[in-house]
Amino acid sequence: MYTMRPAEFAYHRPTSLDEAISLLGEDARPIAGGHSLLPLMKLRLATPAALVDIGHVPGLDGISQENGGVVIGALATHAQVAGSKVMIGIAPVIPETAGQIGDVQVRNRGTIGGSVAHADPNADYPTVLKALGATITATGKGGERTIAADDFFRGIFTTALEPDELVTSINVPATPAGTGAAYVKHRHPASFYAVVGIAAVVSVESGKCTAARITIGGVTSPPVHATAAAESLVGSSGDETAIAAAAAKVPEVLGDAIGDSYASGEYRTHLAEVLTKRALEKAFERAT
Ligand code: FAD
């Protein structure tokens, strides 16, 4: 049955982290911006018995500098991340990514915690967080734990989170001097989700690339590192030939490309190669 009304659910509005966690479980889900969960509930693709509204839990918002990196509270909206002056100086590719999410309404309501917990295969943050080696802090009945982005994103709408755990923050290391990072996406014309999104991070010393990472989102789930492609850049100056050779290796890691009515797997694979070149060009420009 197609309906635009969610099934009945109980609504809780906790005012502390402990209270929120005590209310969570298999059938009681957190809600933050509601921009991913509510559409699913209206289509009855999600029918939680209870919603735990975490919007009034103190301590989950804010963006601060800590241990040389940046800690982003789970409730920080995409608009807050996009406009964060703290982040511009420490990991500028994160606000650059946030500014490309959806439209202004989505950016004003959607949260970074909701985005990573939802793990949409076409979301933007997972690709960039993996490329930067970020970590996700989760808090549940068993306490707090920190999970590397590489281990957190497990597949389509699937993460390492337990049902009683909340994402409480996202921790991003600083992008050091001599390192450039860029995120480039082909956005879906209706939703602006990433049909394909590429994050590239390169380090340059005395004109030569010393390390590189290329992460591809939207083609597989979770996003995947194109390790051989990135390694082929080491020792090069990041010139056009080296970038084209690296991009040509990207399809090697995209065996099981996602296809849908908008973009076939083959088209997504082609886009990944083209966008990798653009992301690398920008990253090298920023590293030098
Ligand atoms: P919610 O909808 O409240 O929750 C989503 C899921 O995460 C639910 O399962 C919920 O239980 C869980 N959850 C929420 N917060 C937490 C937490 N702190 N800890 C644990 N679990 C939690 N995204 C992109 O990346 N790029 C785009 O271009 C883009 N375009 C969009 C366009 C439209 C029209 C819409 C409606 C959405 C779009 N999105 C896009 C998704 C948007 O960014 C969502 O806001 C985001 O994915 C979910 O954040 P939220 O705060 O709304 O989460």
Image (spheres, rainbow, N blue to C red):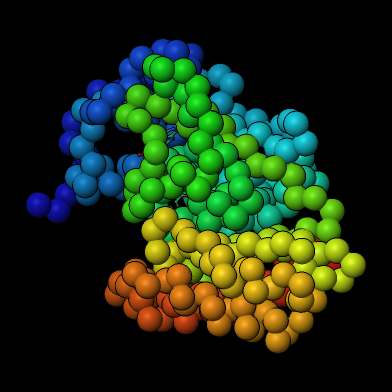
114 vs 257: above or below: above
Q: Is residue 93 left or right of residue 134?
A: right
Q: Is residue 149 left or right of residue 257?
A: right
- How many numbered marks does the figure carry? 0
From the top left corner, tell me how far across and down residue 222 is, in percent: 42, 55
Question: Residue 279 appears in which quarter of the rendering?
Answer: bottom right
> Which residue lies at the image location 36% right of the left edge and 52% below the top edge?
155
> Which residue lies at the image location 84% right of the left edge and 53% below the top edge?
177
From the top left corner, tell me how far across and down residue 77 is, in percent: 57, 41
Q: Is residue 278 left or right of residue 156?
A: right
Q: Is residue 68 left or right of residue 227?
A: right
Which quadrant, please, contains the C terminus? bottom right
Residue 104 seen in the current view: no
Query: In the depicted view, which residue is nearer to us: 231 or 33?
Result: 231
Question: Residue 42 appears in which quarter of the rendering?
Answer: top left
Query: In the depicted view, which residue is nearer to us: 67 or 206?
Result: 206
From the top left corner, tell me how far across and down residue 90 is, in percent: 77, 45
> Which residue lies at the image location 38% right of the left edge and 81% below the top edge?
266
> Which residue lies at the image location 44% right of the left edge and 64% below the top edge?
218
Question: Within the displayed image, which quadrant is ligand 1 positioned in?
Answer: top left
285 vs 42: above or below: below
From the top left corner, tell me how far across and down residue 22 is, in percent: 36, 14
